[in-house]
């Protein structure tokens, strides 16, 4: 839930910046269009030879500012979601060494193997996995197989002591993460 709060704050900050920029662009377009009207009505005197050139330039600038302002206003900032990391015991210790601030998912088997002090320091969530699915990945070891099944369930990445690609799940090492 705390990830959602920080994500919402980031989206609101980006929306405020986006709205401010688009308001400035649209307002500038109206000001330049007003300047164009003053030139065309001969309130601002411009030589006849330059009048059409200046009018076309002001019209193009007005159009460009208005289009860009409306585009920025209607575009929606999409924040990047933090990755869902499932760790085995070696990956969990590596993430704690790097002081990973986010939530770390572990399987129940991994949770039983980690020391209590490690479990208290990390922001852990324990997941139950299907034993039938784990049997498919038993060649990678019991703990990594549980982590792979949990990562498939969450559509996340596995953090372990070595890099691999198992079916749809990417297995990374803690050093691959940029914190």
Image: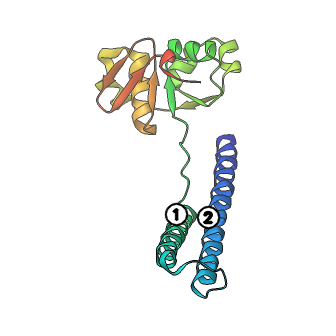
- Number of numbered discs on residues: 2
Mark 2 and mark 1: Cα distance apart in space: 7 Å
144 vs 152: above or below = above
**Quarter in which the C terminus is drawn:** top right
Q: Earlier in the sequence, mark 2 or mark 1?
A: 2
Query: Tag 1: Cα neighbours inside 10 Å, few (<14), some, or many (≥20)?
Result: some
Where in the figure is residue 33, as x and y percent of width and height?
A: 59, 77
Evaluate if marks 2 and 1 touch, with contact meaning CB atoms under 8 Å apart: yes
Query: Tag 2: Cα neighbours inside 10 Å, few (<14), some, or many (≥20)?
Result: many
Q: Residue drawn 39% across and 22% down? A: 171
Please tell me which residue lies in front, 154 or 116: 154
**Quarter in which the N terminus is drawn:** top right
Q: Secondary structure at mark 1?
A: helix
Please tell me which residue lies in front, 164 or 128: 164
108 vs 8: above or below = above
Q: Residue drawn 53% across and 25% down? A: 108
Where in the figure is residue 89, as x and y percent of width and height?
A: 53, 14
Where in the figure is residue 76, as x and y percent of width and height?
A: 54, 58
Kindly indicate the quadrant of the structure image that contains residue 94: top right
Where in the figure is residue 71, as x and y percent of width and height?
A: 51, 64
Whether residue 78 sits left or right of residue 148 in the image: it is right
Q: Residue drawn 49% across and 18% down? A: 88
- The residue tagged 2 is 25
Whether residue 6 sits left or right of residue 159 in the image: it is right
Q: Secondary structure at mark 2?
A: helix
Whether residue 132 sits left or right of residue 70 in the image: it is left
Whether residue 137 sits left or right of residue 127 in the image: it is left
- The residue tagged 1 is 68
Q: How is the image coloured?
A: rainbow
Q: Residue drawn 65% across and 41% down? A: 3
Q: Which mark is residue 127?
A: none
86 vs 41: above or below = above
């Amino acid at each position: 839930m705390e990830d959602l709060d920080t994500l919402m704050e980031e989206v609101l900050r980006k929306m405020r910046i986006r709205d401010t920029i688009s308001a400035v662009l649209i307002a500038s377009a109206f000001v330049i269009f007003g300047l164009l009207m003053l030139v065309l009505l001969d309130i601002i005197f411009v030589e006849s030879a330059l009048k059409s050139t200046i009018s076309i330039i002001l019209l193009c600038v007005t159009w460009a500012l208005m289009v860009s302002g409306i585009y920025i206003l209607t575009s929606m900032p999409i924040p990047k979601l933090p990755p869902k990391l499932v760790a085995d015991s070696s990956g969990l210790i590596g993430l704690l060494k790097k002081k990973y601030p986010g939530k770390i998912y572990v399987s129940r088997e991994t949770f039983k193997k980690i020391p209590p002090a490690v479990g208290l320091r990390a922001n852990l969530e324990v997941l139950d996995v299907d034993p039938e699915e784990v049997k498919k990945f038993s060649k990678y070891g019991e703990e990594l197989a549980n982590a792979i099944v949990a990562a498939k369930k969450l559509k996340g990445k596995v953090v372990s002591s070595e890099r691999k690609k198992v079916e749809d799940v990417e297995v990374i090492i803690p050093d691959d993460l940029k914190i």
